[in-house]
Amino acid sequence: MKKNPDITVCGTWAKIFSNKGNERNVFHLGYGIIHEPVLELLKYNMLLHPSVMIKKEFLLNHHIEYQNYPCVEDYKLWFDIAKAGGILFVEPQELLMFRRSDTQVTVTKKEEMALGSIRLRKEILLYLLSVYNNKTLNSLLSDFENLEKNKWMSNEDIFRFFC
């Protein structure tokens, strides 16, 4: 970040392991500067909080802080930073070893986390639609939401379509 002062948030890839044998997974989402970060965040959260460094002055200058988004506060923070023009960067090296256990929030609050992610992704989608101000796309979203309420379409289908 010292070499590239424009970068606001820098995260890394990670190796994820558990105590249940030798299983190892890797977390490789995105690399380099994330172009169109708001759109990319609609697709997925590419930043693993324990690997992240953030420029504090950017947060202070843009009045950005954690908000009450149960189980997805970090994801919401990345979105707020991206909306404010922050530059997200992922270093394509596995610089974090991350132990997965049955007591972590990602396991114990899996359903709450999934609902929080859907809520945030809907907010991201609405933000993008407001930026593009396209009546046809807004109408499509309304139609798709009706289909989702009737279980004819999933939220994931809606997000994929708009991505």
Image (cartoon, rainbow, N blue to C red):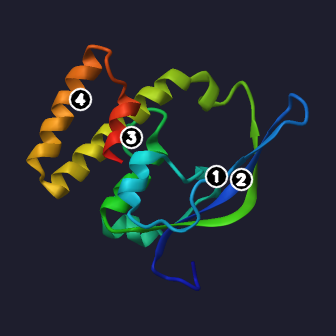
For residue 50, the mark is 1
Residue topped by disc 4 = 144
Count neighbours of disc 3 (C-alpha within 10 A) and say few if under 14, some if 14 to 19, many if 20 or more.
few
**Front tag of 3 and 1:** 3
Asked whether the residues under the numbered discs 2 and 1 touch, taking CB atoms below 8 Å apart as contact, a structural biologist would say: yes
Amino acid type shown at disc 1: Pro
Amino acid type indicated by mark 4 = Phe
Residue for point 72% across, 24% down: 102
Nearer the observer, disc 1 or disc 4?
4
Where residue 53 appears, as percent x and y from the top left, is 57, 64
Give the distance between the C-alpha atoms of the residues marked 4 and 3, in whole angstroms.
12 Å
Label annotation for residue 160: 3
- The residue at the point 18 percent across, 57 percent down is 131
Give the secondary structure at mark 4: helix
Which quarter of the figure has residue 159? top left
Compared across the picture, whether 121 is left or right of 145 comes to right
Residue farthest bottom in this picture: 3
Q: Does residue 63 appear in the picture of this structure?
A: no
Q: Where is residue 37 in the image (x, y as percent from the top left)?
A: 40, 60
> Within 10 angstroms of label 1, few (less than 14), some, or many (20 or more) residues?
few
For the point 90% across and 31% down, the residue is 21
Marks 2 and 3 in Cβ contact (< 8 Å): no
Residue 109: x, y in percent? 55, 24
